Image (spheres, rainbow, N blue to C red):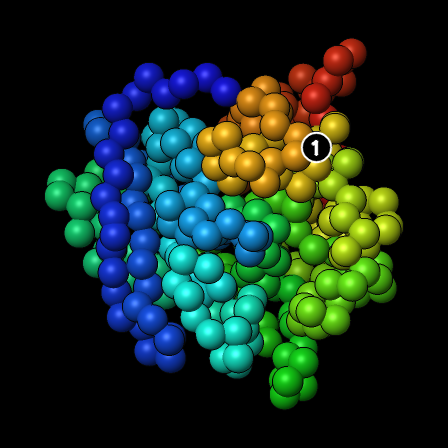
Amino acid sequence: MKQSKTPIISFSPVVLPVAGRYVDLEMKVSAPASGNNLPVILISHGHGPSNFLSSYKGYGPIADFFADNGFVVIQPTHQNSKALGLSPSLPEAPLFWSSRPADMKFILDHLEEILSTVPGLTERVDKARVAVVGHSMGGQTVAMLSGMEVTDPATGKIVNAAEPRLKARVLIGASGGPEGFNGAARQLYPVLAAGNFSTMTLPALIVNGDKDVNPMFSDVDNWRADAYYQSSGPKDLLTVFGAEHIFGGISGYDARETSDENPERVAFVCESILAYIRSAFDPNNTSWEDAKKALNGAGALGSIESKL
């Protein structure tokens, strides 16, 4: 992946108390050192086995890429992060699934306050253009922000966290539909079998690796593309050829949990997401259509399909 040539500032931790949370919300804010009218991108980390990749300290390849391309990047540490050491016996542990979209809504509600902690940043930001990207459990979080309803396994209550203030939504490697969730993880994470993609009506990009198969979760091919096939339009599906669950290494530089380390693949995923977000922000921007056309030739790293 090409190294950044744009000086980037990172400020952490930004810490704010949140009612109903077991711990304060910790965040990292990254931004280019210069420039104005900067859009914002929120990154929702996954669950995973690592202590710090699933926190504001992870996902450096994505965070650096978007800061390098003129975005203010806000990375919260969700309560499922092993870095927090919360008890697995707490309600909703270990995934803390409903507090994750609540974290993102809190950030939107307090965006001005969060940006003001970084000297000189607030006046450089276009606060009307905000996107969200989530990987794995973060993809589940973005699905909820896109309108996917989840039935709380503990109470039977239906939770709808749709967030229309977001101008672009991207799910990477999100869990698929309940009928294909047939591995041992179904017993560990019953909430992942409680989602309803048919209510996911807001526009979104679903990113799926065609080699992202883990029998602990599902033995169904392209199970993690269900968010595209089981929801209504407008939706787009980016299938990344040869990609396993970490898509070449998006969760961290030289991360040991990456089974398909490939900097070229990481760059392709990031550049494709950037094209999608630019066009979502501005309907006259042709970046996404250009990306589709570029994948028609031989040797393409992926494919794109869309539905209205």
Residue at 25%, 48% in the rendered image: 12
Vertical relation: 67 (above or below) 47: above
* Residue 219 shown left or right of residue 209 in the figure: right
Q: Is residue 102 visible?
A: no
Residue count near mark 1 (Cα–Cα under 10 Å), binned few <14, some 14–19, many ≥20? many
Residue type highlighted by circle 1: Ala
Give percent across and percent down for residue 257: 59, 40
Q: Quadrant of residue 110?
A: bottom left
Name the one closer to the observer, 212 or 178. Answer: 212
* Residue, disc 1: 243
Identify whether 146 is placed above or below 125: below
Q: Position of residue 45 (x, y in %)?
A: 49, 51
| Residue at far left of view | 119
Residue ranking furthest to the bottom = 155
Q: Residue shown at 24%/55% (left/top)?
A: 14
In the picture, measured across the screen, residue 223 lies left or right of residue 72, that is right
Nearer to us in this view, 131 or 104: 104
